[in-house]
Image (cartoon, coloured by chain):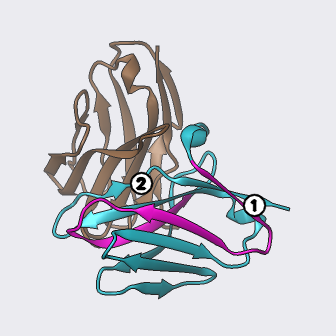
Amino acid sequence: EAQVTQNPRYLITVTGKKLTVTCSQNMNHEYMSWYRQDPGLGLRQIYYSMNVEVTDKGDVPEGYKVSRKEKRNFPLILESPSPNQTSLYFCASSSKGSGTEAFFGQGTRLTVV
Amino acid sequence: GENVGLHLPTLSVQEGDNSIINCAYSNSASDYFIWYKQESGKGPQFIIDIRSNMDKRQGQRVTVLLNKTVKHLSLQIAATQPGDSAVYFCAENPSGTYKYIFGTGTRLKVLA
């Protein structure tokens, strides 16, 4: 089954403790991206990747890092999480970055206390 | 998501009636548009898309209309069912970019 898989689904952590949210897709898609979703603000893009070893900042990249060492995986790294990063995070992939639908993962609910 | 819809406009529709959800997009350079459905606790799910060289596209029970003059998209759902209850939002893709701009969404409530 074609899917985008995120882990974990839920995470509560403390300020400053590094964490990684994993994302994996099995559709051989070139393009992957990370979004955060907050009430009243909709989905905002954090980072995206056009292919292996090619990444770029989205609209809200501060406090986040990503890597794309292999095509199927695109982890989101929070080196020093802060409470304002409490949010619902989604990973998405598409065959091309422009002009094609994106497939979303199930989301990761992150709480930073 | 569970609390994504806290500040969303809500459309309440009787089961069996047609629903129309509207979206104003921001970038006149956008040439590709998508409607997504998001149920509570789940990720957004693709419903239908349309390119700027069209003004209407139909799927199964859904129709998307595009008015480029006023930068407006609408999603029409025919014979709305309880399973259609969700948050719906549009996304636009400015031409030649890798960016998708998402609307904040509309909550659809289907009344039995």
Question: Residue B32: x and y, percent?
Answer: 31, 73
- The chain drawn in cyan is B
Q: Name the residue carrying label 2.
A: B103
Q: Which is the main secondary structure of the residues drawn in magenta? A: strand
Determine whether A43 is above or below B82 in the image. Answer: above
- The chain drawn in brown is A
> Residue A93 is drawn in which quadrant?
bottom left
Question: Residue A55: x and y, percent?
Answer: 16, 49
- Which is more toward the observer, A104 or B81? B81
> Residue B60 is drawn in which quadrant?
bottom right
Question: Residue A63: x and y, percent?
Answer: 25, 27
Q: Amino acid at mark 2?
A: Gly
Residue at (40, 18) in percent of width and height: A83
Question: 10 Å neighbourhood of mark 2: few (<14), some, or many (≥20)?
Answer: many
Q: Name the residue carrying label 1.
A: B110
- Which is more toward the observer, B107 or A25? B107
Q: CA distance from mark 2 to mark 1?
A: 21 Å
What subunit carries mark 2?
A: B
Q: Secondary structure at mark 1?
A: strand
Question: Residue B43: x and y, percent?
Answer: 52, 52
What subunit carries mark 1?
A: B
Question: 10 Å neighbourhood of mark 1: few (<14), some, or many (≥20)?
Answer: many
Q: Amino acid at mark 1?
A: Val
Residue at (14, 51) in percent of width and height: A53
Residue at (45, 56) in percent of width and height: A104
Sequence-earlier tag: 2 or 1: 2
> Residue A95 is drawn in which quadrant?
bottom left
Residue A100 appears in the picture as rendered: no
Span colored in magenta: B9-37
Q: Secondary structure at mark 2?
A: loop
